[in-house]
Every structure is written in C-alpha cells, then in structure tokens.
Image: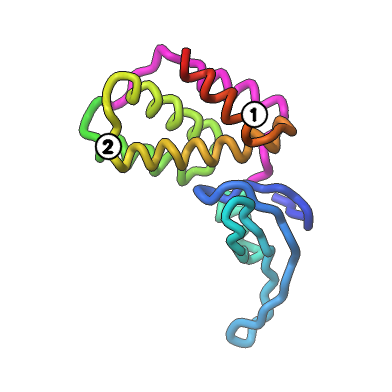
Amino acid sequence: MKLQVGDMVVYPAQGVAKVEGLEEKKIMDTTMRFFVLRVLDSDKKIMVPENKVAEVDIRHVIGEDEVDEVFDILRERNVSFDHGTWNRRYRAYVEKIKTGSIFEIAEVLRDLNLIKADKNLSFGERKMLDHARRLLVQELSIAMESTEEDVEKELENLFAS
C-alpha cells in the first residue's frame, strides 16, 4: 500500500488516522523511516515503519461504492450468531474488530444491536458495541462526506426499526 502525507487511513482497532508525515529515526545504528499517523478522535500519535505498513493492515478509508455494502450488512436481520456465553461472543467480536475491516466491524455492530433487542448486554458487550459504533461512525462520516452526528442519527434510525 502506498501512503502519502495527508491520506486518511484506518489503523485497525484504533480508527481513522491522518498521515501527518514521514520521519527518520536512528535505531541501533540503522536509520529507519516511519510514517507518522495521528488518530483523529484520540489525537494519539502512531509511528509505523515504512517497510511494515502492509503487515500492520493499515488501509485507506472506504470509497462511496463500499458505503452501500456496509449499510446492507447493517440492515440484514436474518443472521445467526453464536448464542453461547457472552465471553465467547466477546472474543469473536474482538477478533473481528482487530481485522480493521469495516465490514467485520459492521457485523459486530449489527449483531450486538440484535442481541440487545432481545436481552441485556454484558458490560464488555456494551463497551464493544460503543467501540464498534465509534469506529464505524468515524469512517462512514469521512467516506460519506458527512458529519459524525448525521451518521449517528442514520445508525440510530436503522436499529430503531
């Protein structure tokens, strides 16, 4: 993947980040180049070695054509998911979020909202729901060129019905 200063990218499990620059650092007599990323909602600075970008699974923010696919996943109601213990589901959802795939994150958000309609979520599941929503809202707002508030409202309406 080719990164350039100014690109908006997704860092798995952290969210949308802006590529702020390229810095050189000397580490044990070796000069290495690092991309400097700034996570938008936490202002966290992440330095990724230039030669490790692919391994970290950083990706560009989705395009408009993929937004519809995300909403199709969110609208799906005829899904089966593991009705086992909450901690087994939680571990599976953590793995999906770690992938950084917006489609996997959309599945987590959808599934947790469907479970929430049936029964109370555990504390861990509620935190996971909030985390998945935050990651999705961030990326969708950029992909749709919309505000996070508008995306939040759209998601609320989607799950209210």
Q: Earlier in the sequence, mark 2 or mark 1?
A: 2
Q: Residue 48 lies in magenta, yes or no?
A: no
| Number of other residues with Cα within 10 Å of mark 2, as a class: few under 14, some 14 to 19, many 20 or more | few
Can you name the residue that lies furthest to the left here? 85
Q: Residue 66 lies in magenta, yes or no?
A: yes
Q: Vertically, is 69 above or below 25? A: above
Residue 147 image position (x, y, % from top left)? 68, 35
Report, in whole angstroms, how far the alpha carbon at label 2 lies from the one at label 1: 28 Å
Residue under label 1: 150
Dot in front, 2 or 1: 1
Q: Vertically, is 57 above or below 134? A: below
Range shown magenta = 59-82
* Labelled disc at residue 72: none
Q: Vertically, is 120 above or below 97? A: above
Please identify the quarter of the rendering in which residue 84 is found: top left
Residue 42 image position (x, y, % from top left)? 57, 55
Disc 1 is placed on an element classified as: helix
The answer to which of 112 and 69 lies nearer the viewer is 112
Residue 16 image position (x, y, % from top left)? 62, 47
Residue under label 2: 122
Judged left or right of residue 20, residue 154 is: left
The answer to which of 53 and 80 lies nearer the viewer is 80
Which amino acid type is marked by label 1? Asp
The residue that appears at 53% across and 48% down in the rendered structure is 12
The residue that appears at 65% across and 58% down in the rendered structure is 38
The residue that appears at 54% across and 41% down in the rendered structure is 135
Judged left or right of residue 19, residue 85 is: left
